[in-house]
Amino acid sequence: MSRIAYVNGAYVPHRDAFVSIDDRGYQFGDGVYEVVYIIDGHMADEGPHLDRLERSLSELSMPMPMSRAALRLVMQRVIRMNQVRTGLIYMQITRGIARRDHKWTSPLQPCLVMTAKNTASSVPLAPTMQSAITVPDERWDRRDIKTIQLLPNCLAKQKAYEAGVYEAIMIEKDGTVTEGSSSNLWIVTQEDEIITRPATHDILNGITRRSVAQVAALHQMKVTERNFTVAEMMAAKEVFVTSASSHVTPLGMIDDTPINNGIMGEIAKSLRKGYIEKVISQGE
Ligand code: PDD
């Protein structure tokens, strides 16, 4: 079966899916995106993803390309046409097409592209421990906007790939941890305090992050939102990342140093299970 993409009103095979070389997304990274996890054929946390999309667009003074209801129909159709049961939907909205010029002088027609793919036959409830490296956070000051300008994130992830590890953890100049190159970061202290960085302009406010915090609350686990240092992370009992594609994934080794002697923690395990059960139940 050939994969089908949605491009500005048309459903086309991937090989025929193109955008203009004058698209401001291609020229300037002038656009936003969302990645939504699909489980049992339905979208996980669909509403919060669309809320964040609208917020990202509004922060960049871009309009929605169509109504929210119409967008949902396109998303559902892309999932159906690609027969996705467990996977991801990617959606990108750019400011539009114009002759190359940093500024834009008139409102442009936004460009919308959507793809979906199967990633696994099912979601394992039990996590697999991964490793990570730390890298300096070299991004701009508005990391809360989910823009397609991902060069610092890509360079960080490439370093992780070349080091043979799963994720690159980004470190602020003041020695605090911001987040992963494509995930949010959490620690559990030796006293079982669950900590993640507050959702300011410093990080992307992950939808999985919010969903996992709700799961924690449901299980009477307290989450504290505060900045934490690399030293605190290295001394933690558990370190884990969250994102639409990793769900909840524990890190057993950072910069070649084992976390808690490389023993997988119970909190990440139970939050992952609770999160997956929560998103499965959204389709029932
Ligand atoms: N990445 N922080 C960054 C920098 C991210 O790129 C992501 C998501 C997250 C987690 O957000 P969420 O829980 O909403 O997926 C945090 C996506 C998956 C990506 O770029 O592919």
Image: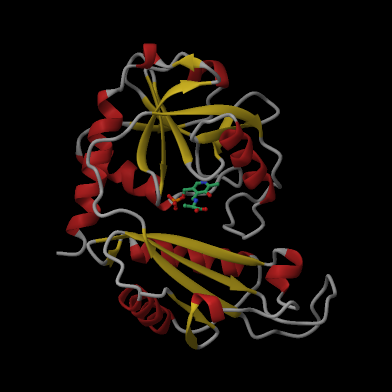
Residue found at the very far bottom of the displayed protein: 9
Tally the marks.
0
Q: Residue at x 36, y 82 (%)?
A: 73
Residue found at the very far right of the displayed protein: 101
Of residues 85 and 97, the one nearer the viewer is 85
In the displayed structure, would residue 87 be above or below residue 250? below
Q: Residue at x 52, y 45 (%)?
A: 182
Residue found at the very far front of the displayed protein: 1
Q: In this view, does 159 lie to the left or right of 275?
A: right
What percent of the width, then of the height, locates residue 244?
40, 52
Q: In this view, does 213 lie to the left or right of 145?
A: left
What percent of the width, then of the height, locates residue 114?
48, 73
In the displayed structure, would residue 164 be above or below residue 125? above
Q: Which residue is drawn at 77% across and 82% down?
A: 98
State the scheme by which the image is colored: secondary structure
Of residues 209 and 121, the one nearer the viewer is 121
Asked if one can make out residue 64 in the rendered structure from this viewpoint, the answer is no
Of residues 235 and 196, the one nearer the viewer is 235
Q: Residue at x 23, y 36 (%)?
A: 126
What percent of the width, then of the height, locates residue 243?
42, 47
Asked if one can make out residue 159 in the rendered structure from this viewpoint, the answer is yes
| Quadrant in which the N terminus appears | bottom left
In the displayed structure, would residue 94 be above or below residue 200? below
Q: Is residue 166 left or right of residue 154?
A: left
What percent of the width, then of the height, locates residue 180?
53, 38
| Quadrant in which the C terminus appears | bottom left
Name the quadrant containing residue 263: top left
In the displayed structure, would residue 155 be above or below residue 53? above
